[in-house]
Image: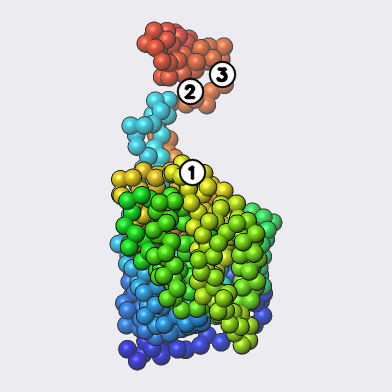
Amino acid sequence: MARRAEAVSETQGRSDSPRFDAARATTEARKAQATWAALPIRERLGVLRKFRHALAEAAQEIAATVPSRLPGNLNRDLADTLVAEVLPLAEACRFLEREAASILAPRKAANSSRPFWLRGISTEIRREALGVVLIIGPGNYPLFLPGVQALQALAAGDAVLWKPAPGGAAAAQAMRRLLVASGLEPSLLQILDEATEAATAAIHAGVDKVFLTGSEATGRAVLRDLAETLTPSAMELSGCDAVFVLDGADLERAVAALLFGMRLNGSATCMAPRRIFATATVAKELAPRLADALGGLAPVAVPERTSDLLQELLFDAENKGAKFLLNGFDAAVRVEGGGTLLYPTLIAQATPEMRVAQTDIFAPVLSMIEVPDEEAALAANALCPYALTASIFGPEKQARRLAARIPAGSVLVNDIIVATADPRAPFGGRKRSGFGATRGREGLLEMTTLKTIQTQRAKDLRAYAPPTEHHADFISGYIQTAHGGKWRVRREGLRRFLDAMMKIK
């Protein structure tokens, strides 16, 4: 245990500029990646297994590398970090150990669906490593979110450049050291400087794909850089997530879940609840319960720019007729060194057109929007430009029917946030919430590129011969035979096909 703790606390110590670091790291990573990708996948997964065991031994030491003061969070304690960062990281690693080999295995296309005219062709679909990927980590979950992506990339045979957000380097370096101690070649996982310029430098150095977890604004900036070289990317961006509370919902559960969503990480979570849709009957009972519960939450520290944005949003909402059941600014306190201590804000009589219902913000604010029915709720939800996750509370059968109609990356029934930590479940957004997937089977496949290998086994060379005057009837007759709707049409096609075939030498 002492040895593991020593490995975690060691510093990496790089003094180069971010641009030079990125260029050198890319060169080193690309050289090591070719050897790593050539290893049998079981050997790569063996390194990950050793890492998971080491992570279990050093769980508290690793958790301690995550700052207790994160953006939008006054004080995340060790237990919160263990359950939000270390535990799901270990579970994601074990998922890869068990499933990655079968997910990445080459597969043969079924002969039963092969066209007759390609009867000599066998088709194999392969997933191969991309090469060097750049992972740009977020500030709110600096270990789990980029850490899972790094493990998936390594399992796929890639090398990784990891650009942590400010405050996230210690956690990234600690994870790297455990991986290196578990047998990973050091050049395969390079931790870049926290500065924004480090990511830009890595992109210019020529990475093969970029994975970003961050805000919409950051996503736009990175995509502008990637456009120059047409470098592909996966973007896990912001949310302004919806909660549908149906008639017949267990309101005690709904309130407990909403309280958790607002408390978790100081509400600095991309899928924290921001908008509640409910009928007037449900809202009348839900509102006072929710106000009472949220009123007991401790304040959270938000940066000054977030505090200023929230004030603008609340001013807009008030001017458009909203009422405040709780106003977090009533007892707000300025924090020495910048920022504001804010209590939760609960808005009643909100409308989907208000800016607060259309903005991604890491602050403890929740808006209640009354709707007459599910159709109106869906229409109101569609006005929001973000579509990351949604939650539904209500009778399961009804809730699952509604879930199928909500355009979002993830929909949770009678739960909020927690289930998305399932390592089997892919995660990603739509609209301004991004594209691509992380985690689960789909997240692993994002770390690969597609290759199709087709082998011709037929000896007939007639397909290469120049066409004759009979080939048009030959080909159209086959199309009519294979794809005609009525049997008479197919019979006529077969007659033309056979007649033309007899005339072609």
Q: Which residue is mark 3?
A: 467
Q: Which residue is mark 1?
A: 376
First in sequence: mark 3 or mark 2? 2
**Neighbour class for label 2 at 10 Å: few (<14), some, many (≥20)?**
few
Residue at 50% x, 66% y is 325
Q: Is residue 111 above or below residue 437?
A: above
> Nearer the observer, disc 1 or disc 2?
1
The alpha-carbon separation of the residues under discs 3 and 2 comes to 10 Å
**Three-letter amino acid code of the residue under disc 2:** Arg
User: Residue 36: percent from the left, percent from the top?
Assistant: 44, 67
Quadrant of residue 82 in the image?
bottom left
> Nearer the observer, disc 3 or disc 1?
1
User: Residue 407: percent from the left, percent from the top?
Assistant: 48, 47
First in sequence: mark 1 or mark 2? 1
The alpha-carbon separation of the residues under discs 3 and 1 comes to 60 Å
Q: Would residue 193 be visible to someone looking at this image?
A: no
Disc assigned to residue 462: 2
Q: Would residue 455 be visible to someone looking at this image?
A: yes
